[in-house]
């Protein structure tokens, strides 16, 4: 039975991961660490695991196969680098890096260690995104001219980050605000579908100032090397996010509205008037896929360290473009 440890419990997704671990009797939680003693104790109690106050002791324990890093983003590198050096499999909550440089260093260390890695980009596993991935690979759309993806909720309006998750609305700790927090999921899908980004621009700003100068909403333009233009949205100010994705190609069009795919394609005899339902089965959550890999199950779909670092690099470029009010080339 593989043993895992929690290194940091700060992220808002930590309770969900603990729930998944409790529902998975084939994996046990051997240790919980957090720099905040009260937070460590609360999550250790929930996970039915001991608090271990020494990260080095956790990493030296050869019985622990993997660590789950849910710390504040600015602490990722100080946890990930020694964990990789200790040969621990790593699930690191998104974003991998505070910015480009630390994400690149972590990706290189993880690759050198040869361990399993993944992060929380769970949108890949949806039946619709799987279908679109294959459709693009099969050239169903012809030349894609425009693609859009949006990931928004009402977190700032609802005060979701007022108390225990307050650090996520402090860019000095999180490395970003609303746009980086939510749009990173949509960015992952765009890069997963379309490949390498050449240059970016955008605007990221604050409206309510509930969390001071922390950004609450943003929109970006991305120019891909294959010529396609993408728009990317992320916000904590949206009461709804009905149209999640649009793809316009010379031979097909797709729209994802209210969780349903509408497809127009002569090749598939689809006129876009009714939801397209011939879809693959959903994948397990990204965290479950990581645990599958740790347990030795083959073909678990994981996010690679380089993919995670690339998302940090593009997001860093978008924030720079918004500050400088210009296009920024992504230096990868």
Image (cartoon, rainbow, N blue to C red):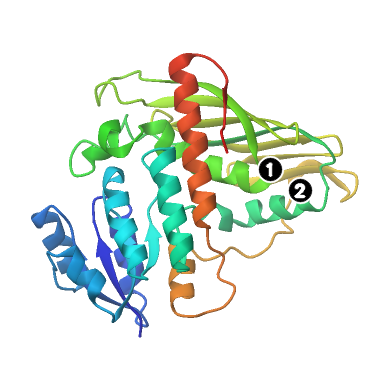
Figure check: 235 above or below 123? above
> 143 or 83: which is nearer to us?
83
Residue at image coords 40%, 52%: 106
Relative to 168, is 317 on the left or the right?
A: right
For the view shown, which residue lies furthest in the top direction? Answer: 325
Asked if the residue under mark 2 is in contact with the one under mark 1, i.e. CB atoms within 8 Å, the reply is: yes
Question: Residue 273: x percent and y percent?
Answer: 78, 40
Report crowding for label 2: few under 14, some 14 to 19, many 20 or more residues within 10 A (C-alpha): some
> 84 or 139: which is nearer to us?
84
Relative to 272, is 97 on the left or the right?
A: left
Exactly how many numbered labels are in the figure? 2
Q: Is residue 95 visible?
A: no
The residue at which mark 1 appears reads as: 194
Question: Residue 31: x percent and y percent?
Answer: 20, 71
Question: Residue 191: x percent and y percent?
Answer: 61, 43
On residue 136, the disc is: 2
Who comes first in sequence, dot 1 or dot 2?
Answer: 2
């Amino acid at each position: 039975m593989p043993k895992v440890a929690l290194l940091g419990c700060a992220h808002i997704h930590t309770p969900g991961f603990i729930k998944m671990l409790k529902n998975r009797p084939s994996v046990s939680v051997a240790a919980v660490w957090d720099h905040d003693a009260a937070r460590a104790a609360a999550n250790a109690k929930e996970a039915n695991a001991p608090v271990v106050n020494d990260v080095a002791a956790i990493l030296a324990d050869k019985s622990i196969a993997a660590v789950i890093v849910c710390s504040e983003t600015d602490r990722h590198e100080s946890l990930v680098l020694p964990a990789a050096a200790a040969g621990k499999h790593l699930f690191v909550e998104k974003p991998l890096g505070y910015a480009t440089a630390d994400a690149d260093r972590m990706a290189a260390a993880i690759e050198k260690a040869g361990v399993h890695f993944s992060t929380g980009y769970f949108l890949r596993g949806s039946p619709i995104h799987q279908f679109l991935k294959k459709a693009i690979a099969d050239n169903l759309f012809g030349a894609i001219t425009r693609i859009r993806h949006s990931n928004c909720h009402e977190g700032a309006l609802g005060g979701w980050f007022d108390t225990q998750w307050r650090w996520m609305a402090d860019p000095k700790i999180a490395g970003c605000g609303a746009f980086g927090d939510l749009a990173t999921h949509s960015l992952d899908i765009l890069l997963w579908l379309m490949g390498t980004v050449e240059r970016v621009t955008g605007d990221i700003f604050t409206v309510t100032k509930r969390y001071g100068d922390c950004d609450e909403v943003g929109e970006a333009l991305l120019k891909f090397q294959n010529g396609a233009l993408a728009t990317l949205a992320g916000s904590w100010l949206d009461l709804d996010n009905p149209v999640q994705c649009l793809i316009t190609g010379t031979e097909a069009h797709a729209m994802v509205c209210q969780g349903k795919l509408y497809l127009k394609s002569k090749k598939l005899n689809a006129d876009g008037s009714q939801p397209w339902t011939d879809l693959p089965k959903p994948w397990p959550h990204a965290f479950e896929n990581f645990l599958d890999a740790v347990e030795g199950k083959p073909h678990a779909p994981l996010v690679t360290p380089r993919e995670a670092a690339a998302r940090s690099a593009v997001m860093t470029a978008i924030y720079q473009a918004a500050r400088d009010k210009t296009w920024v080339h992504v230096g990868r």
